[in-house]
Amino acid sequence: MALTTVNDAGLTSPVYVLATEIDLTSANTITGIPSGTNWVEVMVRDMSTGGTEDMGIQLGTSGGIVTSGYVNATAMVAPSTGVEGHTDGFRFTVTTGAAATFQGIIHLRRMSGNTWVMTAQLADTANNQIHFGGGKVSLSGELTQIKIDPDGNTFDDGDANIAYGE
């Protein structure tokens, strides 16, 4: 059930919509984001792959998933540190081990038009590491879908969901 608020004109609008959770081992794209959405939170739990590449998200329009044009940096802290830049998506992990298991939230906000900014904070609870990132991308149309991207790997565990609003 969506929560609603009433503005001064007496009109109602959704404030917070929670989508249906997906199992990342069987699907990794969340679709149906409505036009006019201005913020999205992507939540992940127990996200893991059998590989070591950087995980992230890619935004999409009705024309498909956008795979270029991102300005993104990501970093990892403890026990060692690492920093990387990316243009193929909003990455939020730095070269992970196959035993990595992530929990966290990726925040997306529309700046203006179809330009989106991202911040992410995730914990690798299997290795006691913190991963974070930020960036921006301009889309050719309205945001309609988000792909949780294992960067060439396959998810072997994990769930994801989104919350969004105007």
Image (tube, grey):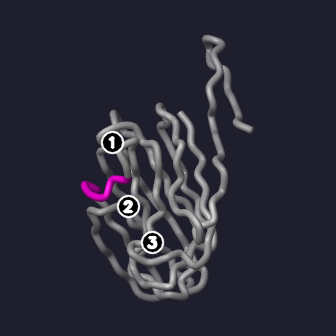
| Residue 151 as seen in the image, left or right of residue 24 | left
Q: Does the magenta-highlighted stretch encompass residue 68? A: yes
Q: Which residue is mark 3?
A: 150
Name the element at disc 3. loop
Residue 108 spot, x, y in % from top left: 46, 49
Are circles 1 and 3 on residues that touch, CB within 8 Å? no
Q: Amino acid at mark 1?
A: Thr
Quarter of the figure that contains the N terminus: top right
Name the element at disc 1. strand
Decide which of tag 2 and tag 1 comes sooner along the chain: 2
CA separation in Å, label 1 and label 3:
23 Å
Q: Using a 10 Å C-alpha cutoff, classify the residue at mark 2 as few (fewer than 14 neighbours), some (14 to 19) or many (20 or more).
A: many
Q: Which residue is mark 1?
A: 115
Decide which of tag 2 and tag 3 comes sooner along the chain: 2
Segment colored magenta: 65-70
Q: Using a 10 Å C-alpha cutoff, classify the residue at mark 1 as few (fewer than 14 neighbours), some (14 to 19) or many (20 or more).
A: some
Residue 58 spot, x, y in % from top left: 40, 57
CA separation in Å, label 2 and label 3:
11 Å
| Residue 123 as seen in the image, left or right of residue 51 | right
The answer to which of 140 and 134 lies nearer the viewer is 140
The image shows residue 144, relative to residue 91, as above or below, that is: above
* Quarter where residue 71 is shown: bottom left
Residue displayed at 39% across by 75% down: 152
The image shows residue 100, relative to residue 146, as above or below, that is: below
The image shows residue 2, relative to residue 58, as above or below, that is: above
Residue 85 spot, x, y in % from top left: 28, 69
Q: Amino acid at mark 3?
A: Pro
Residue displayed at 32% across by 52% down: 136
Residue displayed at 45% across by 72% down: 150
Residue ranking furthest to the right: 1
Q: Which residue is mark 2?
A: 90
